[in-house]
Amino acid sequence: MLIGTVRQGRMSEHAARLVHNELSMRPGVETQLIDIRELGVASDDEGAAVKVPSFSAALDRADGVVITSPEYNHGYPGMLKHVMDTNSWEYVHKAVGVVSVSSGPFGGGRMIENLLPVLRAYGLVPISRDVSIPNVHGVFGEEGQLLDENFLHRIDGFLAELIWMAKTLRYGREHIANEAKNR
Amino acid sequence: MNDTPARKPMRCAHDGAKLNHHATLIRDPLNREEADSVDPVADGVLIEVHACPKCGRGHPRTTGAST
């Protein structure tokens, strides 16, 4: 699970911790919450040149990724892209789900629509479900506690789909060969 | 089938299992040296992505231009 912004006071961290907690309670699932702010990715170069070994290792072990992100100016945070661009083959044929957050009424849906082509370019396989949290200041309290339990149902469906996709793709990665003749 | 190094099966560095080649990435070259190995048909550097059926770890391999 990625906390996808470095902004101080980010509300998306509450959403990430909630989903991480729900995911960690699923039997047979191991999950790791990764805060991109704490990775320390250098900003004076791009891509693999500034790879963080522990982050790459976590991605290699993972069968799926959950990205929790706010919407900034109809898009995803630049730091999220910068961090994700440090890896490549680690993403291929793995499941990804997006949790979006906004302080306004649209829930971050525009961010998701802009992020999906990027996820596809990485080789990640997006699931058909998202979790969008609009008016986030009314959804989480001061201490990050969930105020609207309706979101738990949405998260449940989201995680079920993610886990299914993650398991299916893992089987494919390990047992189904690429059929291209030359590449 | 050509028995080039890029087509020989890979083994997992951790447990020795034969890896499954499940995908090939096409990536833009990062420098002049890589630009020499760009596949002219795919128009990019080819990177095989393999997975171990025992431990699940991934293993990449740059294949270079195909002939």
Image (cartoon, helix red, strand yellow):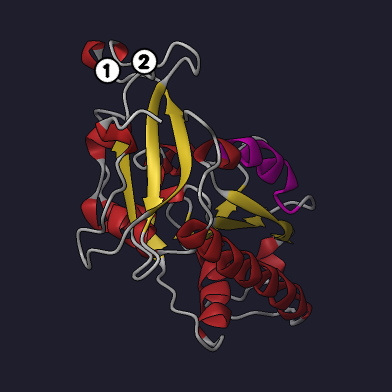
- Residue A22 appears in the rendering: yes
Give B65 or A18, whichever is nearer the viewer: B65
Q: Residue at x 69, y 69 (%)?
A: A161
- Residue A106 lies in the magenta-colored region: no
Disc 2 secondary structure class: loop
- Residue A42 appears in the rendering: no
Mark 2: few/some/many CA within 10 Å (<14, 14-19, 20+): many
Q: Position of residue A165 (x, y in %)?
A: 63, 64
Q: Residue at x 55, y 78 (%)?
A: A23
Tags 1 and 2 both on a single chain: yes
Circle 2: residue type? Val
Q: Chain of mark 1?
A: B
A70 horizontally vs B19: left or right: right
**Tags 1 and 2 touching, CB below 8 Å:** yes
Q: Residue at x 39, y 28 (%)?
A: B46
Residue highlighted by disc 2 = B38
Circle 1: residue type? Glu
Residue highlighted by disc 1 = B34
Asked where in the image residue B45 lies, by quadrant, the reply is top left
Q: Main secondary structure of the magenta part?
A: helix
Q: Position of residue B5 (x, y in %)?
A: 25, 33
Residues drawn in magenta: A107-118
